[in-house]
Image (cartoon, rainbow, N blue to C red):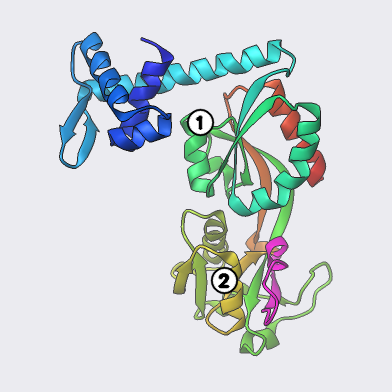
Amino acid sequence: MTTKELLYVKTVADEKNISRAAKKLFIAQPSLSQSIQRIEESVGTELFNRTSGGLTLTFAGERYYHMAIQVLKLYQDFEMEISDINNLKTGRIHLGTTNHLGTLVLPKVLPRFHGLCANIELNIREENTTVLEQLLLSGELDFALMHAPSDPTQHPQFHYDIMKRDPFVLAIAPDHPLTALAETREGYPHPVLDIRLAAKEPFLMLHSSQRIRQITDDVLRRAGITRPRIAMTLRNFETTQLLAAKGMGLALVPMEYSSITPSGFPPVLLSIDEKYHAYWETCITTLKDGFLSKADQLFIRIAKEELA
């Protein structure tokens, strides 16, 4: 039993299709099919159910799959330890980040890191926070550059190394009646609106797998808005701001992101009272018992310096 065989079974199980798995593994489909058959012969039982709808794991296949994940993670940790021994002369970093945060941070961090460790391979996954957490749990990422949840204690398997905080603001149409109810307060960048006054207003939301949506839900819940009116659900925070400016609804967005609105007709931005904890925190997320190589640690240190 080799790591290659373990990877073959895991990939076929993940893809549920020999053809897709072969493409992902960069091998010929017949070769992969033969390898799977040899593995099944070696363990003395079938690992997959072959159906017209694709491949599914048998009970034995499920046990093999979970074992493969554990062994491949052990092997990955071993590779990272060898990288340490080689004093960063070779190695690999499996890094995850959200799409927009990667755009903001990676151009600052990568040139510095590459200048110090040109031979370290970087494998970067850009996904939403929900997927990044799943990839961390499965051992496919060493760490992730993302935003922490409102209540980290609800995610005890992760360690969140907080680097900076960014408040959320309310994007609203310039002629919306609620703008007249906002008041200027010291210490806030924009006039402050009590979010409870928006209880009956329609909201423009992102999808539930996105951290902006999760923070928004928590803020509204603290304000007693447990069942907000959702006008529409989108994936792009820029679009929500443009639609808010047109009076299609209200949108909660991070203040740092509010400056990235296409030119034309921007919304009015209102601050939210701090008692609602309307903010998110940029962080490095790792498994609490996870191993970080020297290359990982160096990358994280540079990221912290750039975001300080």
115 versus 182 height, above or below:
above
Measured as percent of width and height from the top left, residue 303 is found at 75, 39
Measured as percent of width and height from the top left, residue 184 is found at 79, 78
- The stretch in magenta equals 255-273
| Marks 1/2: CA–CA distance | 32 Å
Q: Nearer the viewer, residue 280 or 295?
A: 295
Please tell me the numbered disc located at residue 140. Answer: 1
**Residue depicted at x 50% and y 16%:** 74
Where on the picture, by quarter, is residue 263?
Answer: bottom right
Please tell me the numbered disc located at residue 239. Answer: 2
Measured as percent of width and height from the top left, residue 212 is found at 57, 58
Q: Nearer the viewer, residue 225 or 107?
A: 107
Please tell me the numbered disc located at residue 15. Answer: none
Q: Do the CB atoms of the residues marked 1 and 2 lie less than 8 Å apart?
A: no
Instruction: Name the residue type under label 2.
Output: Thr
Label tally: 2
304 versus 63 height, above or below:
below
**Residue depicted at x 57% and y 24%:** 289
Q: Secondary structure at mark 1?
A: loop
Instruction: Name the residue type under label 1.
Output: Glu
Q: Secondary structure at mark 2?
A: helix
Where on the picture, by quarter, is residue 125?
Answer: top right
Can you say which quadrant of the picture contains the C terminus?
top right
Residue 259 among those drawn in magenta: yes
